[in-house]
Image: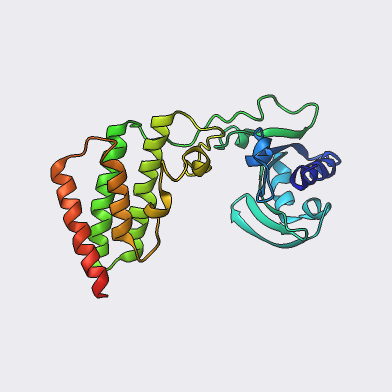
Amino acid sequence: MHPILRRLDELATVLSERADTVALLALGSAGAQRARLDEHSGLDFLVVAQERAVWRLLDRTDWLEAPCPVLWSYAHERNGRTALYADGILAAYRIVTARELAHLPFSGARVVWRRADAPPGLTQSEVLPPRTPYDSPEFHVGEALTLLWSGLHRELRGERLAASRLIQVRAVDRVVSLARLGSGEPLYRDLFDPSRRVERAHPPQVLPLATMVPGYAHNAAAATAVLDWLAPRHPLPAAMVAILRELIDRASRSGDSR
């Protein structure tokens, strides 16, 4: 058994012996899509508890440490913590009530354990991650070009970190969205992070991410790579392309002089 699944079973045993817990739900690669589990997987889970027990379970972590000692932990949100087990498993979890669970955005949950009288529908969230109202090639191309324009101007202003985030993260996100539209839905698509498993769905000869994300000091090269990828695949406004090429040239010369 994979160590992540074993740890979930151990936690389920501990939680099932308490009167104030309702269910244990696994998320991520330990959830409904367990074929994703590998040596690099972390442990994500939700503990559904009675309302009076939420803060007790957050404050007293004896239940969490029963299977294995915890070396380090911190609160990453009001009712959630991240913890590093002594055996190297990194766990992120939330403690919620059944009422709160319905309004928590998640997908792909799997019931590891539930009390016999637990309410139905524990694996179904009423809230999905927000999606752009426009999911069309025109929208993603337009956004990519706009982000390149803004990023190159920030590069020329000397705001290199801000520029890299616009060009090498947000504009590339739009490229990934375009690649997704062109090839259909990838296996195990992550609703919360489109970049997950993109390399598996789109090999380098199709989506050259290494040239689109070359690093902090190479924003002009990154913008060139994004523009060169877009140009043969989508109709681009000639005026905007000309402006971007000029900005890239200026950024390249400015970078060389630094």
Q: Is residue 204 left or right of residue 124?
A: left
In this view, the residue in front, 161 or 207, is: 207
User: Which residue reaches farthest left?
Assistant: 239
User: Which residue reaches farthest bottom?
Assistant: 258
Residue 191 horizontal/vertical position (percent):
51, 36
Residue 101 horizontal/vertical position (percent):
62, 35
Residue 92 horizontal/vertical position (percent):
65, 50
Quadrant for the N terminus, please. top right
Determine whether 1 is above or below 55 in the image. Answer: above
Q: Is residue 187 left or right of residue 176?
A: right
User: For the point 77% across and 58% down, which residue is it?
Assistant: 87
User: For the point 69% across and 57% down, which residue is it?
Assistant: 83
Q: Quadrant of residue 75?
A: bottom right
Q: In this view, does 54 lie to the left or right of 147?
A: right
User: Which residue reaches farthest right?
Assistant: 17
Q: In which quarter of the image is residue 47?
A: top right
In this view, the residue in front, 98 or 220, is: 220
Residue 12 horizontal/vertical position (percent):
80, 41
User: For the point 33% across and 54% down, which residue is it?
Assistant: 167
Q: In which quarter of the image is residue 221?
A: bottom left
Residue 156 shows up from this direction: no
User: Which residue reaches farthest front?
Assistant: 205
Determine whether 210 is above or below 189 in the image. Answer: below
Residue 88 shows up from this direction: yes
Count of marks overlaid on the render: 0
User: For the point 19% across and 63% down, which residue is it?
Assistant: 250
Determine whether 22 is above or below 76 in the image. Answer: above
Coloring applied to the structure: rainbow
Q: Is residue 99 left or right of residue 234?
A: right
In this view, the residue in front, 86 or 74, is: 86
Quadrant for the C terminus, please. bottom left
